[in-house]
Amino acid sequence: MVMLGAAGRDRNDMESGALHSEGRPGADAVRRIADAVRRRVLEHTLTNNGGYLSQACSSAETLATLYTRVMRLGPSQAPLVPRPFAGVPGPENPEAFSGAGYNGPRAPHLDRFVFSPVHYALVLYSLLIELGRLGAGALAAFNRDGSTVELIGAEHSPGHELTAGSLAQALSQAGGIALGRRLRGETGRVWVFMSDGEFQEGQTWEALAALAFHRLGNLGVYVDANAQQCDGAMEAVMTIEPLAERLRAFGVEVHEVDGHDPEALAVPAAGWGRGDRPLVVIARTDPCRGIDLLRARAPKLHYVRFTDRQDRAAYQRLLERLRREAA
Amino acid sequence: MDTVQRPHRENLVRWAGQRPEVLVLSADLTSSCEADGFRERYPERFYSFGMAEQNMMGFAGGLAREGFYPFVHTFAVFVCRRPFEQVAMSIAYPNLPVRLIGFLPGITTAGGVTHQAIDDIGLMRLLPNMTVLECGDATEVESVLDVAQGVAGPVYVRMLRGEVPRLFDPAEPLVLGRSRLLGEGRDLLVLSSGICTEEALRATQALRQRGLAIGHRHVATLKPFGDDELAQAVGETRFGVVTIENHSTIGGLGSAVAELMAARGVGKRLIRLGLRDTYAHGASRAYLMREYGLDALALTRAAEDLTGERLGCDEEALAQVQLETAPAAERVEDL
C-alpha cells in the first residue's frame, strides 16, 4: 500500500508482477515497499513496547525483492484477516492449517517460500500487508492470545510453511521439499530465507553438503547477513566468516551482494535455475538501515525494548518523520 | 519354531516393491540396518545422507510434506538422541508420516554405551503425535511395516536385525494397539516387550510348572499404550505385575504400565525389570541380560518377591526349559 495509497488496495500490480517479469516492479518500487515495511514494524514495535526492529532494517529489501522480483507465486489463497489458531497438528485435529496459502497456491510450476528465521515474523507480516496478501488490520492480532499472527511464527502463521523457530532446521526440510518436487518432475523452485546466525549451527552445513551432493539445483537461499545475533555482534559471539568461501567450498553457487540494493539482490536469481547447483545469495545488510536511532544500542540490537519514555518518544518522532517523508 | 536370518532385509525389498511412494533414507549404516537389499533393488528410491542425522530428519520431514513416505534407517541411538530436536520439530510437531526405523535396541549390541539405545522408547513416547512400536520376533519384523504404514503420523519402530527368533505364528502379525496373549493366569501378570519376551516365555513356563498361575502378554505397541485386554488383566492380577524390557525402567514399558495402573486405581505391586537408571557397557547380550537383570532368572526372582514364596526356580531349572522357539545363536555383530 505504500505504492498505492489505501490499505492493501493495490495488490494487482504486485501480484501480476510476481508472475511476469516484464511487469515486475523496479528497484525504486521495491525500495518503497521496504521502507513501508520498516515503518510498519517500527509502528508495531512502539505499540507493543518492543520488537524485532533491527531485523526489519536489515531484511526489508531482501524479502521485498524475493516476493516481487524473484519468486514465482500465485495470488494469496488465504483470508485477509488471519484465522485464529485452530490447534496443533495431530491425528485428532483435522482443523489445523498452514500459513503457506498467503504465498499462493501449490502448483508444479510455482515456487515455494520457506521462511527460516521466524523471529522475523513481523517483517514478513508487514511485507504481506504491503503486497496486499494480508489485510492492513492483521497486525491487530500480532502476539495476541489465540492468534496465528505470532511473535515468533510457526507453520500456521501467515506466510509460513514450516515451524522453524528453533533455527537452522528449515534448510534441511526445504531440501526434502526440493527433492520431493524434483522426484515429481515439478519445475517450481524452493526459496529459503535465512539469517546469518543460522550458519553457526552444524545442521546448516550438513544441509548444504546434502543439497550439493544430491544436486538440488531447484533450491535457492537468501541470507540476511546483518552480522548481528542475540548476544551481539557475530564477530564477538562466534564468527561464520569467511561465509562466501566456506559456502563455495561446499559446492553451491554463491553470490555476495548489497542487501539493500533490489537490483543487485535480483540479479543472481535471474541467472540461475537451469543447472544442478543450489544457489546461496549472501545479502550483506545493515541492522540499523533506515532507523539510525538504533545505532546507539549496538551491539544489543536483537530485540528492541524502549528504555524510558524519552527513548520511546524519540522513536515516535522518527516514525512521524518517516511517514511525512513517504507521503 | 526357528530363527530367521535378517528378516527385515528381505521383507523390506518385497514390501516396498509395489509402493513407489516409499523411500529409504540412510546415514552410513545401510548394510548394518539391512537396507542394502533395498538400495540394490531400488537405487532411485534410496537416499544417502552420510553421518548427518539432524539433516536427514529434516529431509525426511520435507519429503513427507511432498507426499512421500521416508523410511529412515539408522541405529536407534542416532534416531533418538542426536537429532531429538529435529525429530520433534521437523517430523513430530507437523504430524508427518515419517517412519523411523531404529536398530540395536538396548543391550542387543556389544558396541557399548554409544550404541545401546536404552532411552529411545522413553524419548519417543514423550513426543506428541509419535506412535511407538517394538518388534519382538521375526513375525513382528515382517509385519511392522504394514502397521507403521497404516498410521497417518510419524512412527518410531524399534527394530531387530540379524538372526531373529520366530516366537509368533506368521499368520498372527503385529496389530497396532493390541498386546499379544501368551499365557493366562491370575496369580501374577508378566508384561514383556522386545527381546525380553523370549526370556519371559522361559521363566513363565518354569513358574507354571511350580503351580503359579501366570498371565503373560507381549507388548509391541508402546504408544498408544494399554488395550482393554491388557488393562483387564492388570486389574485382575492377585499379587501384582512384573514388566520386563530391554530399556531403562524409566520411560518405557514399565513406566507405561505404572501410569496405567495408577490411572485405573489398580492397587497392586509392580516390579519393573530393565536397566535401573544405569548405562550399560560393551559385552555380549546374554552377559548383559544377566548383569542387568533382564533375563528369565531375574523374572523368577521378581515372581518370588511378589508372591512371597520360594519357588525354587534356579538357573538349573531354567536351563531345562525347552522353548518351542530356538534361541538366537550368540555371535559377534558387525557394527
Image (cartoon, grey):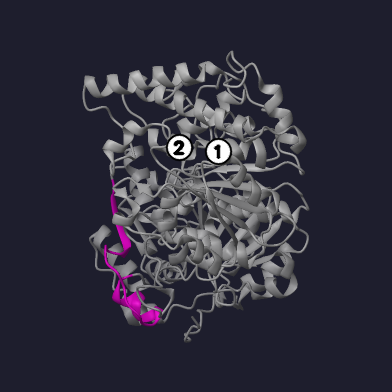
Q: Amino acid at mark 2?
A: Tyr
Determine whether label 1 and label 2 are within 8 Å by CB.
yes
Q: Chain of mark 1?
A: A
The residue under label 2 is A120
Residue B269 is one of the magenta-drawn residues: yes
The secondary element bearing badge 1 is classed as helix
Viewer-proximal residue among A323 and A302: A323
Q: Does residue B63 appear in this view? A: no
**Which residue range is magenta in the image?**
B268-293
Give the residue drawn at x 48%, y 56%: B219
**Residue B14 horizontal side relative to residue B205, left or right:** right
Question: Relative to B23, is A131 above or below?
Answer: above
Give the residue drawn at x 29%, y 76%: B291
Q: Does residue B162 appear in this view? A: yes
Residue A276 in percent (x, y) is at: 70, 62
Q: CA distance from mark 1 to mark 2?
A: 10 Å
Residue B67 in percent (x, y) is at: 69, 48
Viewer-proximal residue among B317 and B167: B167
Give the residue drawn at x 57%, y 19%: A135
The residue under label 1 is A63
Question: Relative to B115, is A226 above or below?
Answer: above
**Residue B322 horizontal side relative to residue A274, left or right:** left
